[in-house]
Structures are given as C-alpha cells and as structure tokens.
Image: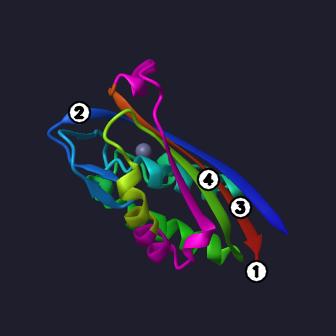
Amino acid sequence: MYKIGIGYDIHKLTVGRDLIIGGVKITHEKGLLGHSDADVLVHAVIDGMLGALCLSDIGTLFPDTDEVYKDADSTLLLKKVYELVKSKNYAIENIDSNIIAQKPKMMPYIPKMKEVLCEVLGISQDRFSIKAKTNEKMDAVGQELAIEAQAVVLLKKI
Ligand SMILES: [Zn+2]
C-alpha cells in the first residue's frame, strides 16, 4: 500500500539572515525570512510527508507563534515528522523535489543536501532526488525576492 503527498513552500529573501536550504548553509548576501531557519526545501518535504498521511501541515504542527520553533533547525522538525510517519507504519519509498531560485546556484550544494537529509531520514541517496531550477528572471523568484521548493513524497506501508 502506497500513499503520496505533495509539498510546497516559499520564503522571502532578505538581508541579515543565513541562507539554509536542505540543511546546508549556502554562501549568499541574503537569507530566507521565517520563524524557523526558513529551510524551504525541508518544509516542502515535511508537508509532502504530512499530506501523504492526511496529518494536516507544518504550520499546524509547528505554529510560528510558538517560541520553541523560533530559528529552529528544520532538519530536527523533519526528523520528528518522519518519526510520526514511521509510527503510522509507513516508510519513505522515494522523494522527488525542486528548488526554484534565481540566485545563488543550487547545483554545487545538492550533493551535500542529499547527504545531510538522507542521513537525517536514514534512507539511501537513490531515494531522494533534488533538482534545481530558476524562474528565468520572471516573477518574485526570478527577481530574487524569494526562493521556492516543491516536493512529492511516496510512502510505503511497512
Ligand atoms: Zn517554510
């Protein structure tokens, strides 16, 4: 038995914040604004997992009004959510994801992101795909005002 979920997230780029995507710190003059570390990719993956099991969403589970999650390391939230998934007797079959950013180039960081996130989830790297896109200089992402991520998560009953 399989369950599939889709996750989407977007955060605004702003000066004075670290840019953390896929659990990796990226060198850039701006970072993503958010209550937690604003890791847009991890948030999309979390929502994909929660969506697959109809367990609401990241904002409901980890409210941005809760001081506990201020500047929280999103990989810890990811770990927590995957524990929840496993407690419902499901495991990750595979994840496919996109990071949409005009700048900086994501490609050099993708191997490290895969390493970090697969380690957190305890899955092999052939189960987690991360792709990078730009928005061809169009819209808020293309104009470097924001970074977006999408994820599809397939879970298998264990
Ligand atoms: Zn987010």
- The amino acid sitting under disc 3 is Leu
Q: In which quarter of the image is the N terminus?
A: bottom right
Among the two numbered marks 2 and 3 on one chain, the one whose residue lies closer to the N terminus: 2
Q: Residue at x 61, y 71 (%)?
A: 126
Q: In which quarter of the image is the C terminus?
A: bottom right
Label 3 lies in ligand 1 vicinity (Cβ under 8 Å) = no
- 130 part of magenta stretch: yes
Element assignment for label 4: helix
Say whether marks 3 and 1 touch (CB < 8 Å): no
**Distance of label 3 from label 4 (alpha carbons):** 8 Å
Position of residue 122 measured from the top left corner of the image (x, y, whole percent) = 52, 79
**Distance of label 2 from label 3 (alpha carbons):** 33 Å
Position of residue 55 measured from the top left corner of the image (x, y, whole percent) = 64, 56
Element assignment for label 3: strand
Report the magenta residues as a range.
115-143
Position of residue 88 measured from the top left corner of the image (x, y, whole percent) = 69, 73
What residue is disc 4 on? 48
Label 2 lies in ligand 1 vicinity (Cβ under 8 Å) = no
Among the two numbered marks 2 and 4 on one chain, the one whose residue lies closer to the N terminus: 2
Among the two numbered marks 2 and 1 on one chain, the one whose residue lies closer to the N terminus: 2
Among the two numbered marks 4 and 1 on one chain, the one whose residue lies closer to the N terminus: 4
What residue is disc 1 on? 158
